[in-house]
Every structure is written in C-alpha cells, then in structure tokens.
Image: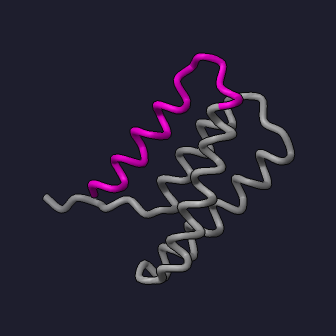
C-alpha cells in the first residue's frame, strides 16, 4: 500500500481552514495567503534553504496569531500536531 506524502501546501491549507473557522481579519487572510504561497514554492523546490527558512518564519507568525486569537478550541494544539505530522512524513 502506497502512502501519500502530504505536501507543505496541503498541510498549510488544513491549518488555514482551521483558522478560518474563527473570526478572521483581513490581516489573517493576508498572512494565510503568504503562507500558502511560500508553501507552494517550497513544494516545488524542497532543497531551497531560503524558502524553508521563509516558510518557518511565516508559519511561526501564523501560529503566534492563531494562539493569540484562539478561544479555547485548541487551535494551537491542532497546529502543533499538524506540523509534527508533516515533519514525520
């Protein structure tokens, strides 16, 4: 059985979708769009160290804002679990 390896883009899309269930501001949308575009670029060139660094910075900022905005629904834990899952696959 072949296991499908998730892409950075698919993982980020899950994170963005989870974030969209909350009250989302235009700034949140902009950050989500930036994170998705960096993830897509990284999927196209996984060996690019500069893109990986930018991805990590964008993801950290997205997570920080998600944690600040969460209302007890466990969004930060969801983000952490999704990232851990991405790292192990």
In the rendered image, residue 46, in percent from the top left (x then y), is placed at 43, 78
Secondary structure that dominates the magenta span: helix
In the rendered image, residue 17, in percent from the top left (x then y), is placed at 61, 41
Q: Is residue 11 above or below residue 25?
A: below
Question: Residue at left 42%, top 44%?
Answer: 82
In the image, residue 86 lies in the stretch drawn in magenta = yes
In the image, residue 9 lies in the stretch drawn in magenta = no
**Scheme of colours in the image:** one colour
Q: In the image, which residues are magenta?
A: 68-89
- Which quadrant: the C terminus? bottom left
In the rendered image, residue 21, in percent from the top left (x then y), is placed at 67, 30
Q: In this view, does 2 lie above or below 18?
A: below
- Which quadrant: the N terminus? bottom left
Total marks in image: 0
In the rendered image, residue 84, in percent from the top left (x then y), is placed at 35, 47
Q: Is residue 47 above or below residue 42?
A: below
- Quadrant for residue 64, please give it: top right
Of 89 and 77, nearer the camera is 77
Question: Residue at left 33%, top 56%?
Answer: 87
* Residue sticking out furthest to the left: 1
- Quadrant for residue 39, please give it: bottom right
Image check: 64 left or right of 45? right
Question: Residue at left 69%, top 37%?
Answer: 20
């Amino acid at each position: 059985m072949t296991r499908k390896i998730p892409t950075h883009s698919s993982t980020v899309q899950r994170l963005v979708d989870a974030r969209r269930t909350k009250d989302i501001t235009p700034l949140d949308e902009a950050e989500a769009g930036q994170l998705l575009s960096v993830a897509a670029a990284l999927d196209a060139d996984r060996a690019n160290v500069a893109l990986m660094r930018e991805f990590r910075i964008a993801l950290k900022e997205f997570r920080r804002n998600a944690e600040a905005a969460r209302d007890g629904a466990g969004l930060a834990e969801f983000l952490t679990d999704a990232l851990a899952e991405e790292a192990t696959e």
